[in-house]
């Protein structure tokens, strides 16, 4: 059932599915994308032979719409999500959805559900979930002939209700992606592979599992479904892992720019050894959903390494958070091209 905007408690939203009036739907048939449109039906009608169901031929994205102080609505770097979905599509032999059409479709679906973009000051946002999936009658292992591109949206709360609270993570003996597999692509298979480790972590009091590189199991790759960053003890460097099996986080690349241009830090994408956590005074996980989530500590074998503090966010992490969210909510001037207005 469609939820009424007037019934939503904006200050107590989590990250839960909520049915809104409109979603976007476009079909790829006979070798081309057909014109998409808004629909009210939250169900996709799929053929039983759809490759997404059997062989996981599908990719997704995640971005947000933000309400600014003056009441307008804006997106953060949606062209980057469009480009990344194209890269995921290339890896899984799916047709690319054009960047401009992606951004316009996002604007259209946000505009249609505008009453559900949470008020400025609540920290809540409208989460946007685009999907690209292979459908139609198939059974052999080969790419589909038909595809669906769809976008649904829902209001979500801030990741941290009571301010930035550090949480702890655990390194387990599971990989989420292979070295030359699909780690760089935002595809469901990587998430299916991570459910078991994530579940174990949650049940044992951790926020999520940390994944090490799949070859040596020595270098940090991902923190659950977010990227890792660390601030060196001298307070001068922002470091983040480099590997072909990491999902290129748009938040991470934005922080690399902000750390350098606005905070005057040196930045580098480099290998970060799990045995070398002592070099950092602060560490965090970053992504659209998590924004920046300070890491209290990491459990690895018998060791538990604490970074800045188990209860308080470090000063540089806090500065990065304020700068990034300031830009996203329109309070801080954005680097050129980062903000797209929904009008
Ligand atoms: C989406 C995602 C991220 C974060 O990317 P953003 O573009 O910052 O939202 C990080 N890791 C994984 C595995 C992801 O799927």
Image: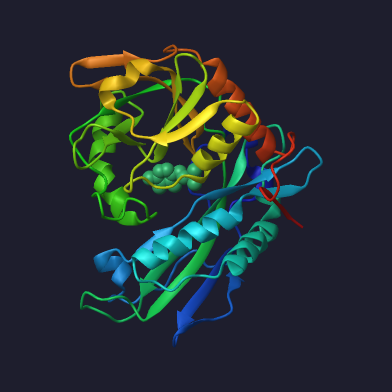
Q: Residue at position x 56%, y 25% from top?
A: 265
For residue 182, what is the image quadrant?
bottom left
Q: Is residue 126 above or below residue 20?
A: above
Q: As displayed, is residue 237 above or below residue 290? A: above
Image region (quadrant) for ligand 1: top left
- The type of colouring in the image is rainbow
Residue 300: percent from the left, percent from the top?
Answer: 23, 22
| Residue depicted at 18% across the width and 21% down the height | 301
Question: For this view, does 123 lie left or right of residue 137?
Answer: right
Image label count: 0
Q: Nearer the viewer, residue 57 or 278?
A: 278
Residue at image coords 49%, 35%: 290
* Image vertical order of residue 176 relative to residue 343, above or below: above
Q: Residue furthest right?
A: 70
Q: Is residue 1 visible?
A: no
Residue beneath the point at 49% across and 77% down? 27
Query: On the rendered image, what quadrant is the C terminus found in?
Result: bottom right
Q: Position of residue 28 (x, y in %)?
A: 47, 79
Which of 297/246 is in front?
246
Residue toward you, 199 or 210? 210
- As drawn, the residue found furthest toward the bottom would be 30
Image location of residue 286, percent across then percent down: 47, 35
Frontmost residue, 225 versus 52: 225
> Picture quarter containing residue 162?
top right
Asked whether the viewer can see residue 240, the reply is yes
In the shown orientation, is residue 127 left or right of residue 218?
right
Q: Position of residue 180 (x, y in %)?
A: 26, 54
């Amino acid at each position: 059932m469609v939820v009424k905007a007037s019934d939503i408690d904006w200050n107590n939203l989590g990250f839960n599915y909520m049915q809104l009036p409109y979603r976007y739907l476009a079909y790829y048939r006979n070798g081309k994308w057909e014109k998409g449109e808004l629909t009210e039906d939250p169900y996709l009608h799929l053929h039983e032979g759809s490759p997404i169901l059997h062989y996981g031929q599908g990719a997704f994205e995640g971005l947000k719409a933000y309400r600014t102080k003056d009441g307008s609505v804006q997106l953060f770097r949606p062209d980057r999500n469009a480009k990344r979905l194209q890269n995921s599509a290339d890896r899984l032999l799916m047709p690319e959805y054009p960047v401009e059409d992606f951004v316009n479709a996002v604007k259209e679906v946000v505009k249609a559900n505008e009453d559900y973009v949470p008020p400025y000051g609540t920290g809540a946002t409208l989460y946007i979930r685009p999907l690209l999936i292979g459908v139609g009658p198939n059974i052999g292992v080969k790419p589909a002939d038909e595809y669906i591109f769809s976008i649904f949206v829902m209001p979500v709360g801030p990741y941290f209700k009571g301010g930035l609270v550090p949480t702890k993570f655990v390194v387990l003996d599971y990989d989420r992606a292979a070295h030359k597999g699909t780690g760089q692509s935002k595809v469901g298979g990587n998430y299916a592979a991570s459910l078991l480790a994530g579940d174990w972590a949650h049940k044992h009091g951790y926020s999520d599992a940390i994944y090490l590189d799949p070859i040596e199991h020595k270098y940090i790759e991902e923190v659950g479904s977010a990227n890792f960053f660390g601030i060196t003890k001298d307070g001068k460097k922002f470091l983040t892992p480099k590997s072909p099996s990491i999902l290129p986080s748009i938040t991470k690349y934005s922080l690399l720019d902000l750390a350098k241009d606005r905070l005057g830090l040196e930045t580098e994408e480099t290998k970060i050894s799990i045995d070398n956590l002592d070099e950092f005074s602060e560490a965090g996980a970053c992504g659209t959903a998590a924004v920046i989530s300070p890491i209290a500590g990491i459990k690895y074998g018998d060791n538990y390494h604490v970074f800045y503090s188990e209860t308080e966010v470090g000063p540089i992490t806090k500065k990065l958070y304020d700068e990034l969210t300031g830009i996203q909510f329109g309070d801080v001037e954005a680097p050129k091209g980062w903000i797209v207005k929904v009008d």
